[in-house]
Amino acid sequence: MTHQRFKAVLVALISFVFFDLTSPAWASLPQGNAVKDPTAILRDALPFEQDDIRQLQHRLELTSDDLRAKRWSALGRTVSRGQALLSTRRKTILDAIPEPLREQADMRLSEVGSGLEQMAARVKATDKPGFIIDRRVTLHQIGEVESLLVKDGFERIIPSEFDSLPRLQGRAKLKISTTKGELTTVVDGYNAPLTSGAFVDLALKGFYDGLPFTRAEDFYVLQSGDPEGPEIGYIDPSTKQERYIPLEIRIPEKAETLYNETFEDVGFFKATPTLPFATLGTLGWAHSDNALDDGSSQFFIFLYEPELTPAGLNLVDGRNAAFGYVIEGFDVLKELGVDDKIITVTLIDEIGGQLKSRA
């Protein structure tokens, strides 16, 4: 480990021990062996029940170890099994998709089949770069099919005490333009509707335009969203009060979302949230060290660094809410610091839903 990276670990740990009350309650670093591809995390977080397409997705994602070791026979068997699964279970997958979307899904599954054929050819040619490209494209097509499996109008049950808060139904893609370049992000209203809704709402209001990055630690975090003046969050013009967003965390195997409760509070010490802090560019919502329900507008971008992620020391998952991921602009992300600022945050696309206001 370089001296610079060792210093970064010390800074991160000291930041946790000596916590500023206006800073978010993130702590150590995410554990190793995590899924580091944000698109894979987002695929896994889609709320649908169809095991066949999920099994095909996971089989292809798990080829990385065999590919690194150049175990071409094992890769060939995986691709062949994927082709057999698609052939035998295609009708079952299509039957689970709403009738108006089946033609679209059928086209995507045909593209998946073509991708598997190309991957099989890459295996025979021991073409590693080509296999990686074809796998990425094929997984994207699988993700497109999976998105069609989400029920139209899907919404999580949210406690009535939060009825006045905006919420995002579905997902949204946003562009964060900075003084170093552009980041493309996807925020997930399926699993963090209030947190994502607050972020999109403030972006549409222009709240983040021109705000600086107020905290930047190498290999650790970037933070922004602190408005100019004495306030540390968004003031709702209708109430003249700071708007608070509750801590919001989902666990895949649990029916209900946790609101204003940490994993420690409910005894989920080994749980992994649906949206984990497990990759470079994870978007997290900041709250103070004294309360869980006082997050307002400040957010942070997690700078995942595998060499600085000792297993078992992840104190971020279950203490802060992740609500999305940077999917493009990683080179820009690594260049940003406290001398930089956000120029604008703009909505590119609402994916499978819309922003709703209950005020």
Image: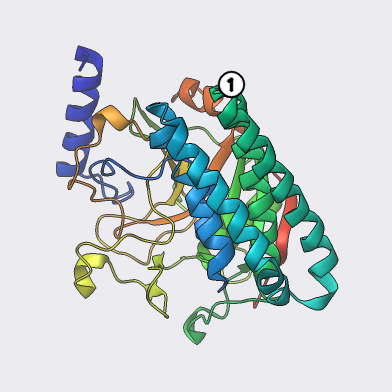
Q: Where is residue 97 drawn, in percent x and y?
A: 72, 73
How many numbered discs, if any?
1
Answer few, some or many: residues within 10 Å of disc 1's Cα (few below 14, many 20 plus, some between 14 and 19). Answer: some
Residue 325 seen anywhere in this rendered image of the structure: no
Mark 1 lies on residue: 180
Rendered position, 236 above or below 17: below
* 292 to the left or right of 52: left
Q: Where is residue 14 drawn, in percent x and y?
A: 16, 35
153 and 13: which is toward the camera: 153
The N terminus: image quadrant? top left
55 and 80: which is toward the camera: 80
340 and 234: which is toward the camera: 340
| Residue at 58 percent of width and 77 percent of height | 164
196 and 317: which is toward the camera: 317
Q: Quadrant of residue 209?
A: top right
Check disc 1 and give the amino acid type.
Lys
Q: Where is residue 125 drawn, in percent x and y?
A: 59, 23
* 343 to the left or right of 284: right
Q: Seen from this angle, which residue lies furthest bottom?
A: 160
Rendered position, 98 above or below 224: below
At mark 1, the secondary structure is loop
| Residue at 85 percent of width and 74 percent of height | 100
The C terminus: image quadrant? bottom right
Rendered position, 12 above or below 233: above
Q: Where is residue 120 drawn, in percent x and y?
A: 61, 37
* 332 to the left or right of 20: right
